[in-house]
Amino acid sequence: MRKIIILLSLALISLGAFAQHDHSKMTTKKKVQPSVKVEHSKSASAIIDNYLALKDALVKDDSKNAASLGKKLFDDFAKFDLSVQAKQQQNELAEIIEDASEHAKHISENSKDIGHQREHFEILSKDVKDLVIITGSDRTLYQAFCPMYNNNKGGAWLSTSKEIRNPYFGSKMLKCGSVQQEISVK
């Protein structure tokens, strides 16, 4: 009987300590503006086209096609003309392109490892979004977010549609996610 009382007391103390835990200091993902306007520009059109095709290949769980599109995207980054961009943005764009190129290359070199491709696609997606915000776009894009990707850390991607087609889980969880942001052309 004494053991039961002690165990119940410990359980109540634990429950009380848990209830007192302050969740207000915990941070979730950072807030994203629901809408961003960018300049109309075709300078990144080839990059956007091949990025979106790569996303679609990952949605379809097609690692071989994703590798091929990663190579095309790598080539697109190499052809990107920084000289037509504003001088103050050229250094930042050069860094974005260098990083994005590395991730596109990893995707192209891993045709048999879709998990590895998806890891690099997550970072590539951030780079492509940063590029679009700076250079502009020729179309409206939507940033979607899957909160379950990467051990519930989440992952974002760009799409031309509000309809969710998840490149991180493909056929396993095709509709996991939601639109976080609209990137529209001014």
Image (cartoon, grey):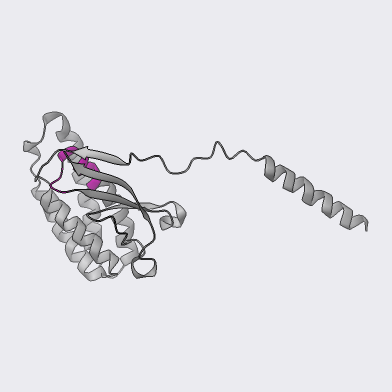
Identify the residue shown where x is 11% and y is 53%: 46
Instruction: Say which of 20 and 100 sits in front.
Output: 20
Residue 40 is drawn in which quadrant? top left
Identify the residue shown where x is 49% and y is 40%: 27
Count of marks, rendered view: 0
Query: Against 10, is 30 above or below?
Result: above
In which quadrant will I find the N terminus? bottom right
In which quadrant will I find the C terminus? top left
Instruction: Say which of 61 and 32 sits in front.
Output: 32
Residue 106 is drawn in which quadrant? bottom left
Image check: 22 left or right of 169? right
Rendering coords of residue 147 (x, y %):
42, 53
Identify the residue shown where x is 35% and y is 65%: 174
Rendering coords of residue 14 (x, y %):
74, 47
Image check: 128 left or right of 19? left
Q: Which secondary structure type mostly characterizes the magenta part of the structure?
A: helix
Rendering coords of residue 138 (x, y %):
12, 47
Which residue is outermost to the top?
88
Image check: 104 left or right of 40? right
Instruction: Say whether residue 144 is magenta.
Output: no
Rendering coords of residue 51 (x, y %):
20, 56
Instruction: Say whether residue 131 is magenta.
Output: yes
Identify the residue shown where x is 11% and y is 32%: 86
Image check: 167 left or right of 24? left
Which residue is outermost to the right?
1
| Range drawn in magenta | 128-139
Query: Against 22, is 12 above or below?
Result: below
